[in-house]
Amino acid sequence: MSNSIPADSVGLVKPQVHHFDEPLTLRSGKVLPAFDLVMESYGELNANKSNAILICHALSGDHHAAGIHSVDDPKPGWWDACIGPGKAIDTNLFFVVSLNNLGGCAGSTGPTSINPQTKKHFGPDFPVVTVRDWAKSQLMLMGRLGIKKWAAVVGGSLGGMQVLRWAISYPDRLRHAICIAAAPKLSAQNIAFNEVARHSITSDPNFHEGRYLEQGTYPKQGLMLARMVGHITYLSDSAMRAKFGKTVTDFENEGTNFGRDLRSGNLSFGFNVDFQVESYLHYQGERFSENFDANTYLLMTKALDYFDPSVDFDGDLSKAFANSDCKFMLMSFSTDWRFPPERSREIVNDLLKAGRQVTYLEIEADAGHDAFLMPIPRYVNAFSKYLGRVHKEISAEQA
Amino acid sequence: MSNSIPADSVGLVKPQVHHFDEPLTLRSGKVLPAFDLVMESYGELNANKSNAILICHALSGDHHAAGIHSVDDPKPGWWDACIGPGKAIDTNLFFVVSLNNLGGCAGSTGPTSINPQTKKHFGPDFPVVTVRDWAKSQLMLMGRLGIKKWAAVVGGSLGGMQVLRWAISYPDRLRHAICIAAAPKLSAQNIAFNEVARHSITSDPNFHEGRYLEQGTYPKQGLMLARMVGHITYLSDSAMRAKFGKTVTDFENEGTNFGRDLRSGNLSFGFNVDFQVESYLHYQGERFSENFDANTYLLMTKALDYFDPSVDFDGDLSKAFANSDCKFMLMSFSTDWRFPPERSREIVNDLLKAGRQVTYLEIEADAGHDAFLMPIPRYVNAFSKYLGRVHKEISAEQA
């Protein structure tokens, strides 16, 4: 391992593509005749294939969850804080599988893929996919890998929703469901924010009803705005205050101390950026819009809006868990206002009502929804201890 | 009075325009050589002109605060719930003055006005105006009306900020400052939402750097998006849930009950509107974008961002109130997450530190920030009783 790679990193990783020729019937009734799933794995699969963990990604995630792709590209995977040797999801103990979901834009079949029927990009013709469809395709990948039962299915946010779907739809295929910073279904406010994001994309004149790739254009401004709105909801007010809310008191010029971290000492009295939080949002939006597909963004937000596993059980989520056979671990974060602790407690209550075994931890953290991606000590310790017990459980059975 | 006008309405009202030929030097250093202010008044000014109340409007408000403009146009003013005979701001007792602020788009000089120097619309050349500038121009209007001291200056949200500015800058010109659902300055999150709104307007290809009127276009999509984002922040999550979050359980089709009030019984599995909250936001955004000027929206959000009266007092708001001579009444609403009760309490604490007399009321209400516009019984009663005492105070002095 190169000197530039930390000892607790999984190091250099290489994505693998799995092609599936079996047709996949989606929740919408549409059929994908064939598809690819791109994945990465970290750690070693044990002899009886009992130590595999599935990682499910959130809205803008992908298969690259840990390690780096090359020594020249030192940006680690999105959950590198939690996946690696000795980390919460310990790759010395587990074989960790992370894939890009269907509809994504990082290698799995999605709107930027070529539609074999038209030889053009799918674009807006890519069917709407749901959390249920993702679990179904993840089950096919599981078969391909020869894994009978996941030691755990793990995810945060939209990833946590996939975890719940696994526990409901495939009760005998996982031992543990670890669902972090999620919700049983979106609130009206959550949907409203998603709709603003979608509207900002679809009203961008470069969107061309989703056929921007054919047109050689890109709805960059729309995607940038969508991400800016999203980003506000991922951070807590207190995290923003900590980052940008410092009251600047050492300016020489009387009357220029407007707090909230002015970008320079002076107000522009124009429509330039005055406060650091503005340039931070611009930067985040801009960077994202250069690396993400707009149609995928639309699909991901719809998957969020549509998620509600109680729907097949007269709106009673506890009934959805009646046949679940795994143990549950839920975690939430105090300042998360996108999916606040109350939403996790709703799930916990329905799990208890269904007689399931559940561990729930509410973590004090300033970072808002994004906290689930961060190495917050109490979070990482609890996560690590829980998975340590999972590993003992597996080892005991193996012995 | 026509049968169609309720007895507790101020009835038909007519705006008046006041022209000012004196130059107004703004906070930015720029000078408006002349300007118009449009206003309405309700109730009668008493003989010694001691019963006048100034209403300050918020981001999208204007001078039309109560009553109606014609019997054919029955849409009442924006604060009709609180202004009228027998209402909280009782027009049987008070002479109520409501104006459109400088930079507005409802009749006062602003970006849609003709710049006498160029004979074209001001558009983006209209100078940035601040809360301080508004109070200064309101003082000139006060002079024009021959009023020496307001019985009260009253406003909610951005209007409440103007109230604080009056108490600080013109301590001998008001008896009472009534500041509702406001904040001592914006949080980083508040600024972030404003910046998203501004970016959605300025990135609309029809914006033309603010010269859309000259170009015969209009950044309708941008303004619509800005309002959609804004609207989410005006409502509480619980208000949205109450409005759109009903779990629909009587659908015949299995699998179509996705709660959050589906617009029809079925999911579209496309990017049409699926949930009522989406069409509600579209409707609000669309309606607003047809009636409001985009440059004015930019100006109003900048006035919000820039507001921080502590700036001239080493960042210590309590020092700003050292010379204030009025009594203060503050109110906030439990589910307001734009300017939550904590923000009002910050102001209250600084008022107490400055030795000011202050009444503070935190009202349980589901409606979020918008609650200040609504006839919520505890709010209206407290408001009404407070102003009743103000009227007794005036009457006692008069006698």
Image (cartoon, coloured by chain):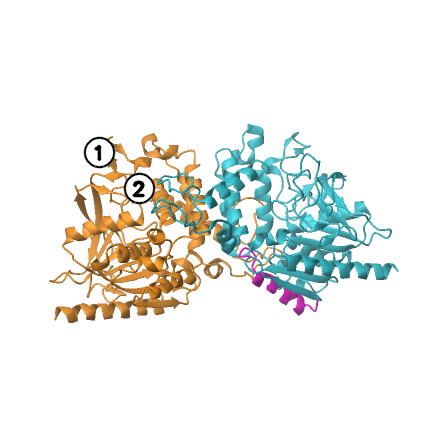
Chain colours: A orange, B cyan
Q: Which mark is residue A28?
A: 2
Say above or below: B174 vs B126.
below
Quadrant of the snapshot with the N terminus of chain B: top right
Say above or below: A146 vs B262.
below
For the residue carrying disc 2, how many other residues have a C-alpha within 10 Å: few (<14), some (14-19), or many (20+)? some
Residue position marked by numbered label 1 in the rendering:
A116
B30 left or right of A274?
right
Identify residue type, mark 2: Ser
Q: Which span is picked out in magenta?
A: B336-356
B21 left or right of B274?
right
Say above or below: A24 vs B90.
above
User: For the residue labelled by badge 2, is the local secondary structure a helix, a strand or a loop?
Assistant: loop
Q: Residue at x 31, y 51 (%)?
A: A61
Quarter where residue B275 is shown: top left
Quarter where residue A363 is shown: bottom left
Q: Is residue B350 magenta?
A: yes
Identify residue type, mark 1: Pro
**Residue in the foreground of this view, choosing between A113 and A262:** A113
List x then y, in percent, for residue A59.
34, 50
Question: What is the distance, in whole Å, between disc 1 and disc 2 at their CAs?
Answer: 20 Å
- What chain does badge 2 belong to? A
